[in-house]
Image (cartoon, rainbow, N blue to C red):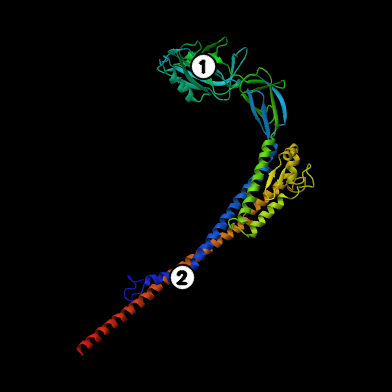
């Protein structure tokens, strides 16, 4: 261990001497730190390349997805009808007329002073089903769900009764409407369509059916064979009725799916005149995926170029300057983009430039809009050129598929990018271990130097003390002589 005040005995600046000697010992550590920084910079650069290739992989995968080429557009010339179309829909057009929308059944009770009690007890039995018969329907057939009973107390207000109905899960919803100090109970079905009507039967406290509208029977809605009694129906449950090119179509809801295969129609109002619906090929969605692929390819090429190039202006090189693997990845991307398609000529397209993606001097691709629009007129040929699989009837993989597969392979566990990253991580780990070991050796050297100079300091101090003693003795001898 170093002494507390080295140099006192000898007069030597021991701290300064040891510090300078240790600094000389530490010089290799600085070189190791610089090496570690360089390795870390390269690892970060390969991480950027890995990310860029992953983006290119994703863009290529999106382009190779069937829905990219089979997308459909839905156009309506009237906002009363909106909709959408899936890839299964045929490109076509048709007219649509909406006679009536699908509706829910609703009924209203008589009026009571706001907040007052019903004044009668009993049970309401609610069941969802379908009314059939003459006019608004006089016969009721219950659906699959059983009737739900609601217990009514004489002290209940209409708000209490509405809460009980809403909590019962009977397939209807109740609310209270207030006007000029009077409350009315409004009960509405939860679904549209003929089969989503409902019947409400009433019984008094003793379980005797009430069919004359008295007491809790005022909230019933049923038919006694001659007339409806209890609440008043304000809207019957209805299916939507429409015509598609003159063909009658009914739907229990206002969302009509697959009346035209692959097409969903959203009805919002009756129509006074036929609505024109057009289902088209969604070329814009395809173009957007092609553009995303072009951008991803350009980003990867530009990134690798920046990481491997030397900047004459700043006199600095990229972190991967001279890296053969990085330049090999860039070269492969360039060669793939410049290669021929899966056959000699796919619909007049042999190379990317034929479909409007033209290679620039810096290696990136630019879009020739007129050429791309022309190529979009034959989507089948364009799809084959870009995304064909070698297992398909047309021999060879499409250009975009080849580039995507290369990017995916480079990023795989045994690919070039992953291999370089793994090697750099190992080199960084080894360098860190070397630095730690070297730091330990330097610390030991520092301890040893302090120990040596401490002994030297002590010895010189002893010699100086002895010299002073001898000098004093000689001086005494001279005086006594």
Picture coordinates of residue 91 (x, y %)? 72, 31
Give the crowd class for mark 1: few <14, some 14-19, many >=20 residues within 10 Å. Answer: many
Q: Position of residue 75 (x, y in %)?
A: 67, 28
Image quadrant in which the C terminus is located: bottom left
- For mark 2, give the secondary structure: helix
Q: Is 456 positioned to the left or the right of 365 in the image?
A: left
Seen in the picture, residue 412 relative to 451 is either above or below; the reply is above
Q: Nearer the viewer, mark 2 or mark 1?
A: 2
- Relative to 20, is 259 on the left or the right? right
Residue found at the far top of this picture: 226
Q: Residue furthest bottom?
A: 481
Q: Which mark is residue 201?
A: 1
**Which residue shows up at 32% across the image and 73% down it?**
8
Which type of secondary structure does the marked residue at label 1 adopt?
Answer: strand
In the depicted structure, whether residue 32 falls above or below residue 288: below
- Residue 401 in the image: x percent, y percent? 70, 47
* Rendered position, 197 above or below 212: below
Observer able to see residue 260 = no
Quarter residue 291 falls in: top right
Q: Is residue 18 left or right of 198 when viewed as pictured?
A: left
The answer to which of 253 and 327 lies nearer the viewer is 327
Q: Could you say which is closer to the camera, residue 57 or residue 331? A: 331
Which label number is shown at residue 24?
2
């Amino acid at each position: 261990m170093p002494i507390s005040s080295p140099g006192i005995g000898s007069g030597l600046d021991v701290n300064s001497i040891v510090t300078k000697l240790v600094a000389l010992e530490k010089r290799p550590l600085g070189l190791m730190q610089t090496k570690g920084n360089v390795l870390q910079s390269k690892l970060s650069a390969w991480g950027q390349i890995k990310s860029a290739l992953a983006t290119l992989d994703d863009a290529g995968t999106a382009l190779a997805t069937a829905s990219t080429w089979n997308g459909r557009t839905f156009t309506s010339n009237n906002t009363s009808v909106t909709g959408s179309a899936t890839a299964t829909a045929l490109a076509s057009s048709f007219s649509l007329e909406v006679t009536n929308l699908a509706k829910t059944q609703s009924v209203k009770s008589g009026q009571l002073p706001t907040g007052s009690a019903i004044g009668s007890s009993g049970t309401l039995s609610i069941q969802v089903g379908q009314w059939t018969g003459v006019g608004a329907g006089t016969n009721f057939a219950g659906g699959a769900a059983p009737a739900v009973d609601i217990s009514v107390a004489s002290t209940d207000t209409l708000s209490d009764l509405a809460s009980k109905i809403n909590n019962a899960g009977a397939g209807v919803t109740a609310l209270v409407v207030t006007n000029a100090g009077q409350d009315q109970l409004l009960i509405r079905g939860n679904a549209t369509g003929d089969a989503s009507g409902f019947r409400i039967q009433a019984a008094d406290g003793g379980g005797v059916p009430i069919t004359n509208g008295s007491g809790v029977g005022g909230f019933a809605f049923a038919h006694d064979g001659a007339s409806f009694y209890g609440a008043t129906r304000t809207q019957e449950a209805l299916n939507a009725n429409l015509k598609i090119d003159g063909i009658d179509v009914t739907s229990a809801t206002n969302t009509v799916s697959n009346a035209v295969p692959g097409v969903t129609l959203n009805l919002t109002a009756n129509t006074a005149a036929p609505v024109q619906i057009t289902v088209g090929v969604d070329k814009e969605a395809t173009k957007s995926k092609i553009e995303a692929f072009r951008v991803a390819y350009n980003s990867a090429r530009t990134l690798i170029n920046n990481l491997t190039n030397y900047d004459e202006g700043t006199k600095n090189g990229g972190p991967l300057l001279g890296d053969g693997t990085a330049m090999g990845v860039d070269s492969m991307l360039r060669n793939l983009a410049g290669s021929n398609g899966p056959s000699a000529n796919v619909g007049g397209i042999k190379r990317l430039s034929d479909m409007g993606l033209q290679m620039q001097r810096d290696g990136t691709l630019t879009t020739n809009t007129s050429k791309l629009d022309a190529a979009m007129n034959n989507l089948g040929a364009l799809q084959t050129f870009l995304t064909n699989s070698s297992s398909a009837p047309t021999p060879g993989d499409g250009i975009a598929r080849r580039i995507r597969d290369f990017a995916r392979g480079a990023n795989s566990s045994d690919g070039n990018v992953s291999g370089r990253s793994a090697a750099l991580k190992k080199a960084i780990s080894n360098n860190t271990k070397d630095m730690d070991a070297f730091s330990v050796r330097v610390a030991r050297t520092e301890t040893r130097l302090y120990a040596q100079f401490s002994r030297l300091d002590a010895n010189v101090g002893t010699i100086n003390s002895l010299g002073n003693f001898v000098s004093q003795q000689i001086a005494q001898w001279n005086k006594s002589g």
